[in-house]
Image (spheres, helix red, strand yellow):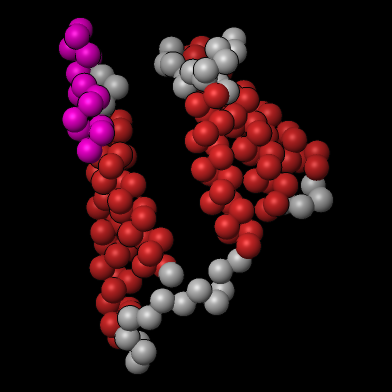
Amino acid sequence: MRILFLLAILAGGLFYTYYAFNHLAFLSQTGRLGPGFFPRIVGSGIVFLTLISVVQELLRMRATPEGITLRFDNFSPGALFIILMGVGYLVALRFLDAVPATILFLFATLSVINRGRYLQNVLVSVLVPVAIYILFRKFLNASMPQGLLGLPF
């Protein structure tokens, strides 16, 4: 099961890196670092570290007496819920803006992971996206993903 997860992460990292290198400019028109600078570093790091993990996992699987076997016996329904929430977050980013989508995602995910701590879940769900918004929009003057609704965030 772990090898499938690593291969999925590798595929996503390869797509992200491809997009960063082919669609985002390394330098802006003024000669300053452009929107492709940081994604290239992150994407390359994801691919490199995931490749190392894939090789290590294949070596570990080869060393076991059973050989390469896929086991799904310890897959939890909570993990499936978190995966579905991640997909839902991507869809919500398309329709809502970044801040409301992140608040909804964090609250729903924390409700599963951190049960019974409602105040803490609400505070984290609201304060983290607001802090990220303030950091990106006010201090870094960077844009946030815009949704179809065009909310004033």
| Residue 142 sits above or below residue 132 on the image | above
Q: Is residue 21 magenta?
A: yes
Question: Which residue occupies 62% across, 25% down?
Answer: 100
Question: Which residue occupies 28% across, 42% down?
Answer: 15
Range covered by the magenta-colored residues: 18-32
Residue 59 placement, left or right of 94: left
Q: Quadrant of the C terminus?
A: top right
Q: Position of residue 25 (x, y in %)?
A: 21, 21
Q: Position of residue 4 (x, y in %)?
A: 38, 64
Q: Position of residue 21 (x, y in %)?
A: 20, 32
Q: Quadrant of the N terminus?
A: bottom left
| Residue 51 sits above or below residue 142 on the image | below
Question: Which residue occupies 80% across, 42% down?
Answer: 118
Q: Main secondary structure of the magenta part?
A: loop
Residue 119 placement, left or right of 33: right
Question: Which residue occupies 47% across, 22% down?
Answer: 145
Q: Quadrant of residue 30?
A: top left
Question: Is 118 or 23 nearer to us in this picture?
Answer: 23
Residue 35 placement, left or right of 115: left
Residue furthest out toward the bottom? 65
| Residue 80 sits above or below residue 119 on the image | below
Question: Is 84 or 5 nearer to us in this picture?
Answer: 84
